[in-house]
Image: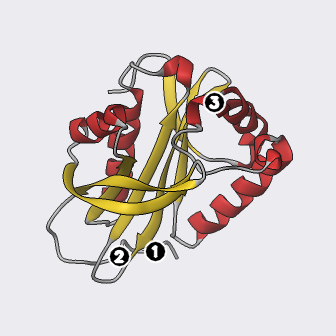
Amino acid sequence: MLAEGYEIRPLDESDAAALAAAYEHNREHLAPWDPDRPARFYTEAGQAEEIARALELREGDQAYVYLLWRGGTVAGRIALNNIARSVLQSGTVGYWVAHDHTRRGLATAMVEHVAIEARGLGLHRLEAGTRTHNEASQAVLRKAGFEQYGVAERFLFIGGEWTDHVLFQRILHDDPPGNPPTAG
């Protein structure tokens, strides 16, 4: 359940300024978990470019990004990425919550929101990974119904080195594969 005063909305092209402000405000907070980013990433123009790419991926049913809002401030972001169709029907979840909004159940609510959206898209399975020492994020995934299924050594390049990640999955249903009908 989402805490009072917050809402989750799909990413929109008008979100660049608020998202840039959120990334800049949380730069240190996100540094241990995110890849190195160029300075332009933290600007409105840089976020406008990121949003354009994300919306193009959404159009192609490859990724869906949602923002967590409190008033006019971005308090978090969650993405359903790497969508694979056919016999796999899977996607990868990645998220963050602003440092001044943590410990309120918001990350769990965002993950639950994306699980519902993914099920509506016809996906069968979600996957997520955390750095091995990110116990808070591991707890979020467990609360949201994910199960640990392994460790990937030297999985992502973060902070100048290849980092190990704990891998989680959540099976959404056991229905036969079938992409959702397209509007037409």
Furthest-bottom residue in this view: 86
State the residue position of label 1: 182
**Amino acid carrying mark 2 in the image:** Asn
Residue 130: x and y in percent read 37, 47
> Where 6 falls versus 172 (above or below)?
above
- Give residue 103's mark: none
Quadrant of residue 128 in the image? bottom left
Which residue corresponds to mark 2? 179
Image location (x, y in percent) of residue 38: 77, 50
Image location of residue 158, percent across then percent down = 55, 52
Q: CA distance from mark 1 to mark 2?
A: 8 Å
Q: Where is residue 4, by image quadrant?
A: top left
Do the residues bearing badges 1 and 2 touch, measured as CB atoms within 8 Å?
yes
- Residue marked by disc 3: 28
**Residue type pointed to by label 1:** Thr
In front of the other: 106 or 13: 106
Q: Quadrant of the N terminus?
A: top left
Q: Amino acid at mark 3?
A: Glu
Looking at this view, is 182 or 75 the one in front? 75
> Closer to the camera: disc 1 or disc 2?
2
